Image (tube, rainbow, N blue to C red):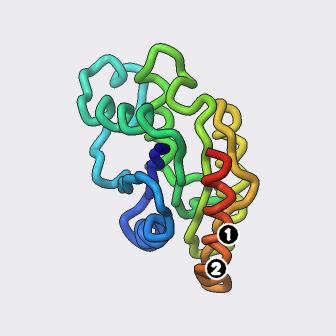
Amino acid sequence: MSKILIISATSGTNLALANKISDLLDLEREIINLEDFIMPLYTPNVEQRDNSVIKGLCEKFIKSDGFVFCAPEYNGGSPPILTNTITWLSVTTKHWREVFVNKKVLIATHSGGAGSRFLSTFRVQLEHLGSIVYPRTIMVNSNKKFKVESVENILTDFIELI
């Protein structure tokens, strides 16, 4: 059976979105909140330190068949915590794409603005890392509320991909 890792970049509305998505999935899944994983800002001189938090997080990613990322748009792109996490994951294994290559990914956002720039820029980054990004996304904001039926349709098709 497939396992999905649902990643929330923040502990607010995106964690709530992650929980709503999780409630609609009928397969093995785990929700993680990146704010729960204390890791330093990546710099090459910090990379050499032993960091069991990052290694444990990396194992969760490796053992999953697919990911659902829930993150807000920050300054027209990804939030810093997500960028830092992706960077750490790419330097933790022998091959920098190992965590992401051929993993199926669904991107979701609950943003103060539209969130469309996060969705598009993060898609490009994930594809560069070797992920297979599902073409539909989940977008929630003040003008676009969470619609259970729509999200169920997206998740059903995403699960078929996995």
Q: In screen coordinates, is 127 left or right of 108?
A: right
| Mark 1: few/some/many CA within 10 Å (<14, 14-19, 20+) | few
| Mark 2: few/some/many CA within 10 Å (<14, 14-19, 20+) | few
Q: In screen coordinates, is 135 left or right of 145?
A: right
Which residue matches tag 1? 153
Distance from label 1 to label 2 (Cα)? Answer: 6 Å
Q: Which residue is drawn at the image coordinates 72% and 42% (left, top)? A: 124
Quadrant of the image occupied by residue 154:
bottom right
Horizontal and vertical percent position of residue 127: 70, 37
Q: Secondary structure at mark 1?
A: helix
Q: Which residue is drawn at the image coordinates 57% and 60% (left, top)? A: 74
Horizontal and vertical percent position of residue 57: 34, 38
What amino acid is labelled 2 in the image? Glu
Q: Secondary structure at mark 2?
A: helix
On screen, 101 above or below 70? above
CB under 8 Å between discs 1 and 2: yes
The numbered dot on residue 72 is none
Horizontal and vertical percent position of residue 113: 64, 74
28 or 86: nearer the viewer: 28
Quadrant of the image occupied by residue 59:
top left
What amino acid is labelled 1 in the image? Asn
On screen, 153 above or below 120? below
The numbered dot on residue 149 is 2
12 or 46: nearer the viewer: 12
Horizontal and vertical percent position of residue 138: 64, 67
Q: Which residue is drawn at the image coordinates 57% and 71% (left, top)? A: 111
**Image quadrant in which the C terminus is located:** top right
Q: In screen coordinates, is 32 left or right of 94?
A: left
